[in-house]
Image (tube, rainbow, N blue to C red):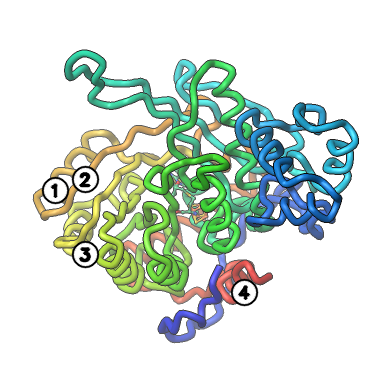
Amino acid sequence: MSPTDAAGEQTPAATPSTPAPTPVPRASRAAPRRATAARPGLSGLPDGALEEWLAAHGEPAYRARQVRDALWRQNAQIADELKTLPAPLRNRLDEAFRIDTIVDDEVKVADGGLTEKALHTLRDGSLIESVLMHYPARGFAGPGRMVHRERNTLCISSQAGCAVGCPFCATGELGFGRDLETAEIVDQVRHAARRLAATGRHLTNVVFMGMGEPLLNLDRVLESVAILSDARLFALGARHVVVSTSGVVPGIRRLTELGPQFTLAISLHAARDPLRDVLVPLNRHWPVAQVVAAARDHARATGRRVSYEYVMISGVNDTELDADALAMLLRGDLAHVNLIPMNPVAHTPWQASPPERVAAFAARVRRGGVGVTIRANRGQDAGAACGQLAADRAGEPPAPAVAHRREEIVRQSEVALRGSRSAEGLPTDLEAAVRFGSRR
Ligand code: SAH
Ligand code: SF4
């Protein structure tokens, strides 16, 4: 990520350092922090590195295309699957690189086969998740013309765990583990593509809405997007990639300078600072107005509409006041709001807003002049929310700790619902992530 001070952003006045929220203790947290492997992942090599390595080992240049085809057309996971290469070269590649960076997959199917949720184990034991969502073709507009083509969307992770700590999110509750390497990000895509290929389908969209805050690992996310959209590799159109952020303002500004790379989504969840301070703790560092200003500039500069994600939490952020605040904040912008009923997670006292409340909220925001779509939740029967599978694997937290965490969330939100801004500082991990980003 770009360092927060590099983009010349105004940082809010220092807040008193009252203790930050304490995530529920578990047998094992998001991921052990260990040094990265000596052997780089083959699929994440920077442009030209493979060619250099091959030349240094006396191999002809065309071998690079053979390796790329094996990785991206056959989705090879072991050296033996680099079939077009001579055995000695396969072995040397295997010694120098990891052909695959995902050690193990556990795949759960939900929604009658339309959703596949995968828990991936990485080399150091870190657990991450990806979710594959199948959207069948819809409608018929004449011979061979579908209104909506079939889509297969993969939701991928950019970090193991997350430092932001949104209280409604299972990943946030796990805490921060580590940034993913570029190969670990793109190998989630190769694994899903391999599973899809077995049924004659292919991946059409990739969204960075799994575990982690992509803009706090921005360098690797940008490298991954470059790989995924490279015509020689995965060849996914940049318009088919969405990156979601909880509001890392310097990261958004950096993306604007780079020009359109992908669709930007902002996880807003509240239009008022007091409430957003609680729902998205990063708001204590970059308040709503700064986040929306950066997103607005991004939309203007790139001509691309920004999506705003808004998780609907019953009695917390779904009031008429919240709808009006949201409409007022985004009216006139090149923006669209997606309302997502909250997936239940164990450590929170909150629930999803009932469907009629979501519909009324949507109608009010629409009347206020802002486009809105109500999104269905996917994969509830496969471990509900993002981070839930990893949380389950980490072990059931002790009941008193859950009760304590719930009380803490209720206390914080009571203050917020009265309209006062949080006086709490950033949690230590988040402070470090904001300060150093992917330079750690
Ligand atoms: N950290 C980034 C990207 C990953 S989270 C971000 O927050 O934008 C992807 C989306 O899932 C976010 O919009 C997040 O708010 C949402 N999400 C997290 N927990 C959820 C839950 N329990 N129910 C519904 N959506 C959830
Ligand atoms: Fe992190 Fe996004 Fe979850 Fe918030 S919603 S804790 S930013 S993964």
Q: Residues within 10 Å of mark 2 (few under 14, many from 20)?
A: many
At label 2, which amino acid type do we have? Val
Q: Residues within 10 Å of mark 1 (few under 14, many from 20)?
A: some
Report the disc number at residue 436. Answer: 4
Specify the amino acid type for callout 3: Leu
Q: Earlier in the sequence, mark 1 or mark 3?
A: 3
Q: Which amino acid is tagged 4?
A: Phe
For label 1, the residue is 366
Q: CA distance from mark 3 to mark 4?
A: 30 Å
User: Foreground residue, 33 or 298?
Assistant: 298
Pointer 2 or 1: first along the chain: 1
Asked if ligand 1 lies within 8 A of label 3, the reply is: no
**Which tag, 4 or 1, sits closer to the chain's start?**
1
Q: Looking at this view, is 228 or 418 the one in front?
A: 228
Q: The residue tagged with tag 4: helix, strand or loop?
A: helix
Q: Is residue 403 visible?
A: no
* Labels 3 and 4 touching (C-beta < 8 A): no
Cβ at disc 1 under 8 Å from ligand 1: no
Residue, x 47% and y 49% (percent of image)?
A: 168
Secondary element type, mark 1: helix
Distance from disc 2 to disc 1, alpha carbons, whole Å, reads 6 Å
Mark sitting on residue 329: 3
Q: Position of residue 32 (x, y in %)?
A: 77, 54
Q: Which residue is mark 2?
A: 372
